[in-house]
Image: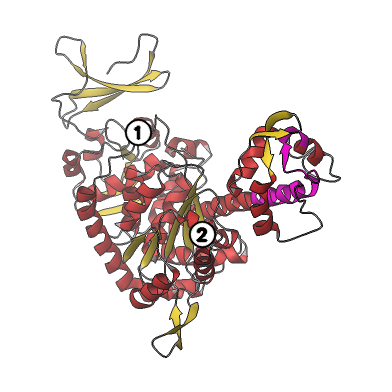
């Protein structure tokens, strides 16, 4: 489709056939947009490519020259490489639009794929690699280090790098092997088709899926904790997708502690625990489940229960992969043992593929077979890599959670080490920020108990905030600009909501002490000195 009248043509990229005759061209406009047009035979143009044969960019040049063919995501990057004396091409219409009829031109050639540094670039590289793995003489995916998000080959060259460096980097990159890097990228792509995932989540998520096939090789296996601030943020859909990929999935939403440890002992499944808000409850069942999960990330973790008619003590293993989803913050002990994924509601502008179980399942089963075959063949090497790892860039608890993923990556696609390191730093940093905010919430809860008006069953939000600001060395007057709305947000995770209350003859937004007392008791413990009682 042609751009609007306010746009101007910034560049034209011709696509000739083998003889050099023009088939069509891609037009770049400013503001940035793209369109395609073909000659109408009368000196003019017809917008669109309906019925037009598709060929790779700069086709005559790479057909008439021997050597490695570099595939970029766009024409500008291909031109930059060609200006430096390299053979370069791309497909028309950008990322995600590689067509099968392009494969024939790469038969018997050494092919190098240069992905852009974003999710679309990752998907496109995987698509091209799948398409050419059976026709190319050799196939390499070269990841350019130091790129900013959405960076491309042109950015890399403008950063001072050269064609010689690219050729050297290509020579150092081992050819792609079916069952290694390709499997990893296929797992990433499969998950991202149906759920909006931040770029720093995709690689760890895929490696965690693969780790479920060999978790017993590790001393510890991090939980995958998927949370959101509200419903309809994609948690359940992500759980549905992962249930098709992990080893021995067992999805449950309301399992008892007794059933859970017996199933783990018997089957060693991957537990997918949905709607886990019950873990934040006060009942005996919630306490037992939390206790089991507090230990179940380590290989030697067991629970001992009396069983049988003679009530003989028996130990049950509780170690297995676990995915836990829920709204709001999970208990700190669960978060501490987890790789935390915080989901957000999808924007109207963001699109995902429709998830149809009957269509997705056969594709996922084939992918699971490939994962299983890879792990079976390479388990010894993965174990060796795991034993030799030292992740010094994150704290010990987080390192324990991430070591299994780095061990798998080392034997699948080692050049992506820096990418996974950045993912780990981002996710552990976000978790630390969440923990700090949670600590602030607990501080606020304690200070509310301190300033609650004596012998009053209700209090106005404005009066509580005024009293909080008066506490010496508290954060409420300077670090945190506390207002009624922010106070309500801090209280919401504790199940406390502001409402219209009466104090004396006046009414305004505030709180009932009876609503706060359960949170005082649970999170702060009994303290007769500070817990004020209503008259």
Element at badge 1?
loop
Vertical order, 412 against 229 (above or below):
below
Residue 295 is one of the magenta-drawn residues: no
What kind of element bears circle 2?
helix
- Kindly identify the residue that appears in the image at 50 percent across and 67 percent down: 293
Q: Is residue 353 left or right of residue 292?
A: left
Q: Determine the CA span between mark 2 and mark 1.
A: 49 Å
Residue on which disc 1 sits: 74
Q: Does the magenta stretch mainly form a helix, a strand or a loop? A: helix
Q: Which residue is mark 2?
A: 279
- Find residue 172 and report its image quarter: bottom left
- Find residue 477 and report its horizontal and vertical position in percent: 80, 37
Disc with the residue nearer the chain's start (2 vs 1): 1
Q: Magenta segment, which residues?
A: 436-463
Judge whether 361 appears above or below 73 on screen.
below
Neighbour class for label 2 at 10 Å: few (<14), some, many (≥20)? many
- In the image shown, does 143 or 80 lie closer to the viewer? 143
Measured from the top left, where is residue 468 in percent x and y? 79, 41
């Amino acid at each position: 489709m042609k751009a609007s009248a306010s746009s101007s043509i910034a560049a034209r990229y011709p696509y000739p056939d083998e003889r050099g005759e023009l088939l069509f061209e891609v037009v770049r406009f400013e503001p940035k947009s793209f369109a395609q047009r073909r000659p109408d035979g009368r000196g003019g143009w017809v917008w669109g490519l309906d019925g037009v044969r598709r060929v790779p960019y700069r086709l005559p040049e790479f057909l008439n020259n021997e050597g490695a063919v570099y595939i970029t995501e766009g024409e500008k990057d291909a031109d930059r490489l060609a200006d430096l004396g390299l053979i370069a091409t791309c497909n028309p219409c950008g990322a995600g639009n590689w067509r099968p009829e392009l494969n024939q031109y790469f038969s018997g050639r050494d092919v190098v794929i240069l992905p852009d540094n974003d999710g679309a670039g990752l998907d496109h590289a995987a698509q091209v690699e799948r398409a050419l793995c059976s026709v190319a003489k050799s196939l390499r995916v070269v990841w350019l280090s130091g790129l900013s998000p959405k960076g491309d080959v042109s950015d890399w060259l403008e950063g001072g790098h050269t064609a010689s460096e690219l050729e050297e980097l290509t020579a150092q990159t081992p050819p792609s092997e079916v069952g290694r890097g390709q499997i990893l990228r296929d797992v990433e792509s499969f998950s991202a088709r149906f759920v909006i995932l931040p770029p720093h989540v995709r690689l760890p998520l895929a490696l965690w899926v693969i780790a479920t096939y060999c978790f017993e090789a590790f001393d510890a296996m991090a939980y995958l904790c998927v949370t959101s601030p509200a419903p309809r943020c994609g948690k359940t859909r992500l759980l549905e997708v992962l249930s098709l990929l992990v080893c021995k999935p067992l999805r449950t939403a309301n399992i008892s502690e007794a059933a859970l440890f017996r199933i783990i002992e018997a089957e060693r499944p991957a537990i997918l625990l949905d709607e886990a808000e019950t873990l934040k409850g006060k009942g005996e069942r919630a306490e037992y489940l939390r206790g089991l999960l507090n230990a179940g990330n380590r290989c030697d973790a067991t629970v001992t229960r009396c069983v049988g008619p003679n009530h003989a003590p028996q130990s049950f293993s509780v170690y297995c992969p676990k995915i836990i989803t829920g709204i709001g913050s999970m208990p700190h002990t669960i978060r501490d043992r987890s790789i935390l994924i915080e989901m957000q509601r999808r924007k109207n502008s963001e699109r995902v593929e429709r998830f149809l179980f009957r269509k997705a399942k056969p594709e996922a089963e084939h992918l699971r077979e490939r994962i299983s075959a890879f792990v079976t063949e390479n388990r010894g090497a993965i174990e060796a890599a795991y034993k030799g790892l030292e992740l010094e860039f994150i704290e010990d608890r987080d390192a324990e959670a991430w070591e299994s993923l780095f061990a798998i990556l080392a034997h699948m696609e080692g050049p992506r080490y820096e990418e996974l390191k950045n993912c780990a730093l981002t996710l552990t940093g976000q978790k630390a920020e969440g923990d700090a905010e949670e600590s602030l919430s607990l501080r606020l809860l304690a200070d509310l108990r301190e300033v609650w008006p004596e012998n009053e069953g209700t209090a106005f939000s404005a009066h509580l905030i005024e009293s909080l600001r008066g506490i010496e060395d508290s954060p409420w007057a300077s670090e945190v600009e506390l207002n009624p709305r922010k106070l309500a947000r801090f209280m919401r995770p504790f199940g406390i909501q502001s409402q219209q209350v009466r104090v004396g003859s006046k009414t305004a937004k505030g709180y009932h002490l009876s609503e706060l007392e359960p949170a005082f008791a649970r999170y702060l413990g009994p303290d007769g000195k500070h817990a004020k009682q209503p008259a």
